[in-house]
Amino acid sequence: MTAPPGTPLHRRIHAYYAHSARRYGSYLDGAKHFGFHPEGRRINEAQARALLHDQVIARGRIGAGDRVLDAGCGTGYVACDIAAKTGAHIDGIDIVDFEIEKARARASRQGVADLTAFQVMDYSATRFPDARFDVVYTTETLSHASDLDRSLREFHRVLRPGGRLVLCEYSVAEEAAFTPREWDLFNRIAEGSAMVGLRRIRHDLFTGRLAAAGFAQAAEEDITANMLPSLQWLRRLALLPYYLVTWPLGRQFHNPNRSAAVVYCAMTEKGLIRYNIYTAVKPG
């Protein structure tokens, strides 16, 4: 995330994730991403999140011995599962210090401490040498990047020639597709959630940013239908307190998590927000 320590954006991101942990930590077990629900099959959220990790593994062709960067690793939920499944070595970085502490504890509990390393670092300006990694992936963290292009160039720099990029990220329709009220709601929630980069990830256009950063074979796969059950589940958790507490008090943006679960779910169902897997390769 493009947010040096001590900056206003860093403080906003830190506060956002602290609030998320308090509000939804017991439901999500520290996860900060949605799941992948196969068509025609009913599974729970933990199973769906594990299947999303499998999508990352498959598209990144992650295997034993690979060196992998989890950019915006949070509590290590994704990194620890992928390390356990593949035997790859994963470096997880995040700008939220208390998340890194949780990631290290998780790795120890799950028996993958020897395959993972977690540290506080800004993924738009890492301290890794050139061509360090075989794979770089993100799971819903680029929405918090204030400079998307700088972050993509850094991913390109630290990948070896032939290295793979996998990004599980939202995208947004052009402003003209929203009603004025929808656009206002979208922006106010994005601001309250410190998602300063979300407006720059546009439907069908983000692969152009990947190409401009030096990547080849850039592709976008819309998996909104597979993610939507996760978002609808989160909306059910948030719906009652959203209407009983938020609206009567006129504080609909006091709790950005609750607002996002309700409002962004409706926008996703309308196609204004999508969920995608972007893939690309560093030419070698």
Image (cartoon, grey):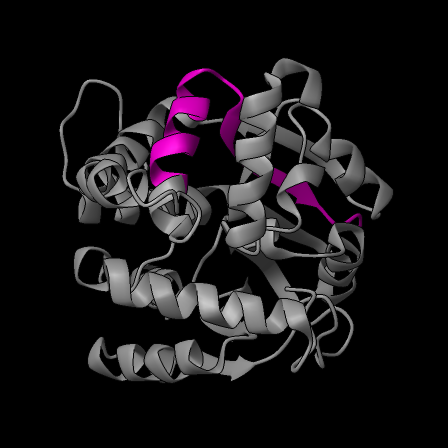
Residue 36 image offset from top left, x and y in percent: 32, 36
Residue 173 image offset from top left, x and y in percent: 63, 23
Residue 203 image offset from top left, x and y in percent: 64, 25
Snapshot quadrant of residue 178: top right
Q: Is residue 215 left or right of residue 92?
A: right
Spot the residue most to the front: 249
Query: Looking at the figure, which quarter contains the N terminus?
Result: bottom right
Q: How many numbered circles does the render carry?
A: 0
Question: Is residue 262 covered in magenta?
Answer: yes
Residue 219 image offset from top left, x and y in percent: 65, 30
The answer to whether 35 is drawn above or below residue 86 in the figure is above
The answer to whether 174 is drawn above or below residue 136 in the figure is above
Residue 226 in view here: yes
Residue 87 in view here: no
The answer to whether 68 is drawn above or below residue 140 in the figure is below
Q: Residue at x 46, y 24 (%)?
A: 267
Snapshot quadrant of residue 141: bottom right
Q: Is residue 216 left or right of residue 89?
A: right
Q: Is residue 144 left or right of residue 230?
A: right
Question: Is residue 110 covered in magenta?
Answer: no
User: Which one is nearer the viewer's eye here, 261 or 84?
Assistant: 261
Q: Is residue 124 left or right of residue 94?
A: right
Q: Residue at x 54, y 74 (%)?
A: 93
Q: Residue at x 72, y 81 (%)?
A: 127
User: Which one is nearer the viewer's eye here, 281 or 21?
Assistant: 21
Q: Which residues are magenta?
A: 260-284
Snapshot quadrant of residue 234: top left
